[in-house]
Amino acid sequence: MNDPVRILILDDNPGSVEMLSAALRQEGVKIFTSSDPEEGLDIVRSEHPQIVITDLVMPKLSGMEVLEQVVEFDPSIDVVLMTAHYSTESAVEAIKKGACDYLDKPVPIQLIRDRIGRLLESARRRAQAHRLQSELSASCEFEGMIGNSPQMWDLFSRIQRVAPHFRSVLVTGATGTGKELVARALHRLSPVASGSYVVLNCSAIVETLFESELFGHVKGSFTGATHDKIGLFELAHGGTLFLDEIGDMPLATQAKLLRALQNQEVLRVGSLVPRKVDVRVIAATNKDLRKEVGEKRFREDLYYRLSMVEIQSPPLQARQGDLPLLTQYFLRKFAQQYNKPVTGITRRAQTILSNHSWPGNVRELENVIGHACMMALSDMVDAADLPQYLLQGVSPLATPPPMDGAPAAPAVPPVGAEGLEAQERRLIAEALQKTGGNQAQASRLLRISRDVLRYRMKKHGLVSA
């Protein structure tokens, strides 16, 4: 059964609240009401209504201030303002600030049903789109990779065709595009999936140790060789050897690697007896090996040996349509990892992500979403939760404006400067201090409901002033 559409009716006139509730009551709609705007904003943060209907003139906070704070919290919420003091100027101001409608009291019953009916239908379509997106996410995962773009379906298809047959394969692509995921998929779908999967990062090995790492050595073959050592080729016998960043392998070692690939045998350093191996080799690089060959930094014969089959992992910029899928995947991953109730991302934050060029590709996106989930104090990731470098040029979104004369929210330190729990406790303590212990103001400053604030105050041993 589909979740009901949630409507919040906010008016200090009980008669108006009752009239609107009766007019809009129907199956598939859940109605919340309040005569207190601060309580109403708590409901917005805790219940996430799709539609908010608010009076313009109320004590404590005006409808215009409620509109600003609702839009600040989640711009996707439809806000309808009503007033008995209609003016063209206030209507224009409300629309500019994000209201979707502005009605003059008393509002005829049929008119309010028609206007809200259209918003209800729009909310249902968005909910259906979200459900379809979730179903799509599940169907667009292939061996740990996420994608629904033509580039990714082509990649998945190539992996499936190559995996049963390859002896050596070259995986190319920029840093962060998921070359190791491609390698693992090739191994898992190969006939040697039950064998070892051995990894060597060629950029992390000292040149003098390469041969020993790959092929092993015998006792006494060089200073420090106090015992026989098996190499990674032998360790991967009956399985797969993944050579990451092979473009960084020294030329001398490249010649010996070529012989090992051609003959399927290795010679330990200091030994005269070759050893037969049965190993499938996957090499990966972010370099242009053709260019490296031309500049004599990579052996041409090894390049052609490896590139008999070449699989390219596409950059994120070339598959922007996969950005929402990947974002939701990482949101779920980090919400579970951090044990936080993060379920979505605001339109404003989505816009910032979609406008970024992603030079670090999927790995950069993963780090960004991990940072955002760590920073989020509500169940929605917002612009202020994103890393600071993404917000350059859109700095007004980074920090919500002060409310009720409260100071601006404190700046968030970079990830890693302190633990997650310590950051959360510090932010809550600073918000309470700056608002003189006023929990309503502190919750608005932190963009969480008062119930969530009280729970986290209790968790961190904080008491209000």
Image (tube, grey):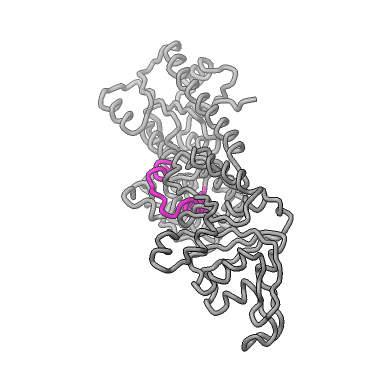
Q: Nearer the viewer, residue 284 or 443?
A: 284
Quarter occupied by residue 292: bottom left
In-image side of 389 versus 446 (left or right): left
Q: Is residue 137 visible?
A: yes
Where is residue 341 drawn, in percent x and y? 59, 45
Chain part drawn in magenta:
349-377
Give the residue displayed 45% in from the left and 18% down from the top: 118
* Dominant secondary structure, magenta: helix
In-image side of 197 versus 45 (left or right): right
Q: Nearer the viewer, residue 122 or 327?
A: 327
Whether 132 is drawn above or below 174: the answer is: above
Q: Is residue 465 visible?
A: no
Where is residue 388 drawn, in percent x and y? 40, 55
Quarter occupied by residue 208: bottom right
Q: Nearer the viewer, residue 145 or 233?
A: 233
Quarter placement of the N terminus:
top right
Q: Nearer the viewer, residue 323 or 68?
A: 323
